[in-house]
Amino acid sequence: MRNRNSNPYIPDPLKIALLMAFWLLLTHRFTFGNVLLAAFLAWLIPLGVNRIRTAVTPVQKPLKFVSFLGLLLGDIIVSNIVVAKQVLGAPARLQPGFVAIPLDLTGDLPITMLASTISLTPGTVSIEISEDQKTLYVHALHVADETMLVDRIKQRYEKPLKEIFEC
């Protein structure tokens, strides 16, 4: 996807302005040198990113994606509370374990989104994706029922991502 500009070496002015503002707010330094550095980075970063961007927006259902982000945020909050109770409780009751989740998702981005979603949720972390991208390995802090954990991840996260990316 090309910029609206015909010149490939000059990124969209809006991108430049936003990146400059972000850099300046992040550093809290409004010196001449820092503004110059912000301008340089704001020009360079979009040029580098344009090479890896796809021509098609991968998200096919943006409203469903926003809903998914809300679900994820809620799950992160609830999981923090659950993990805190588990860790502060009797450690002997924890049953950590590894689980193999068979994937129905296809494509690098949807699988990466699923792995990231699992890792963002406290108490679980994505470990590895099989070479054929058919299995995602996850470590969980507490695995009382492996089948229930797999079903929960597939229904709560994989199914919506499959709809969002239509894959």
Image (cartoon, rainbow, N blue to C red):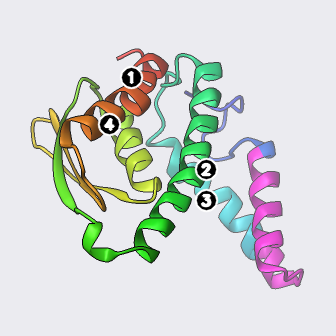
State the SS at label 1: helix
What is the distance, in whole Å, between disc 4 and disc 3 at their CAs?
Answer: 29 Å
Residue at 55 percent across and 60 percent down: it is: 81
Query: Residue 78 location, x and y as percent?
Result: 56, 51
What is the distance, in whole Å, between disc 1 and disc 2 at their CAs?
Answer: 32 Å
State the SS at label 2: helix
- The residue type indicated by label 2 comes to Pro
Q: Which residue is mark 2?
A: 46
* Most distant residue in the left direction: 131
Q: Main secondary structure of the magenta part?
A: helix
What is the distance, in whole Å, between disc 3 and disc 2 at their CAs?
Answer: 6 Å
- The residue type indicated by label 3 comes to Leu
Q: Which residue is mark 1?
A: 159
- The residue type indicated by label 1 comes to Lys
What is the distance, in whole Å, between disc 3 and disc 1 at their CAs?
Answer: 37 Å
- The residue type indicated by label 4 comes to Ile
Residues at discs 3 and 2 in contact (Cβ within 8 Å)? yes
Query: Residue 47 location, x and y as percent?
Result: 57, 50
Query: Magenta stretch?
Result: 15-36
Q: Which residue is mark 3?
A: 44
Q: Residues within 10 Å of mark 3 (few under 14, many from 20)?
A: some
Residues at discs 2 and 4 in contact (Cβ within 8 Å)? no
Residue at 62 percent across and 47 percent down: it is: 9
The magenta stretch spans residue 34 = yes
Label 3 or label 1, whichever lies nearer to me, is 1
In the image, taking residue 86 as reference, residue 79 lies left or right, namely: right
